[in-house]
Amino acid sequence: SGYNLGASYERGSLFAALTTGNKLSAFNVSMMYKVNSDITLASSTTHCESKKCDVIACGGLYKSSFGDVKAKVGADKVIQASLIKDVLPKTKLTVSGSIVGTDTSTFKYGLGLEM
């Protein structure tokens, strides 16, 4: 077991959170910025003595007229994207895909229906 701390800050369109790991030797910073009512950006990084800044993931949300588009890129070079659309009242359709870098042999897709 260990000890760690966490704190968050929110003001207007900005939200930030700081947590520690490994007995205060690593710092995790998560940030989200709402550009406007349609666009939100987010990032997650880790900072420690051995690696000054490790970008874990960066992503965003775009609320378009045809549905919500979400995308993110991780430190593992996996690119993920999804489209979430209300197709009927209380019914959502989600179409998603991921790929590692530009290697098309790693492409995966999914389809979900929530009722």
Image (tube, rainbow, N blue to C red):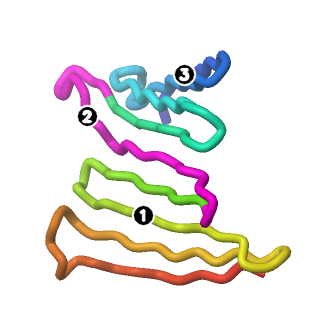
Q: Earlier in the sequence, mark 1 or mark 3?
A: 3
**Three-letter amino acid code at the position of disc 3:** Leu
Residue nearer the viewer, 105 or 18: 105
> Marks 1 and 3, Cα distance to the nearest angstrom?
32 Å
Please state which amino acid type lies under the numbered disc 1.
Ala
Residue ID at (43%, 27%): 29
- Residues drawn in magenta: 47-67
What kind of element bears circle 1?
Answer: strand
Q: Residue at x 48, y 38 (%)?
A: 41
Say if the magenta span includes residue 62. Answer: yes
User: Which is in the foreground here, disc 2 or disc 1?
Assistant: 1
Instruction: Point out the tag, 2 or 1, that comes first from the N-terminus.
Output: 2
Closest to the camera, between mark 3 and mark 2, is 2
Answer left or right for 89 relative to 99: right
Examine the rendered structure and indicate whether residue 78 appears above or below residue 53: below
Question: Label 2, label 1: how many angstroms apart (C-alpha)?
Answer: 22 Å
Label 3 to label 2: alpha-carbon separation: 19 Å
Say which mark, if any, is on residue 81.
1
Q: Which residue is mark 2?
A: 54
Residue at 35 percent of width and 26 percent of height: 26
Magenta stretch holds residue 74: no
Disc 2 is placed on an element classified as strand
Tag 2 or tag 3, which sits nearer the N-term? Answer: 3
Query: Measured from the top left, where is residue 30 in percent x and y?
Result: 47, 31
Q: Position of residue 85 (x, y in %)?
A: 65, 70
Q: Which residue is mark 3?
A: 5
Near-viewer residue (84 or 112):
84
- Is 26 or 61 nearer to us in this picture? 61
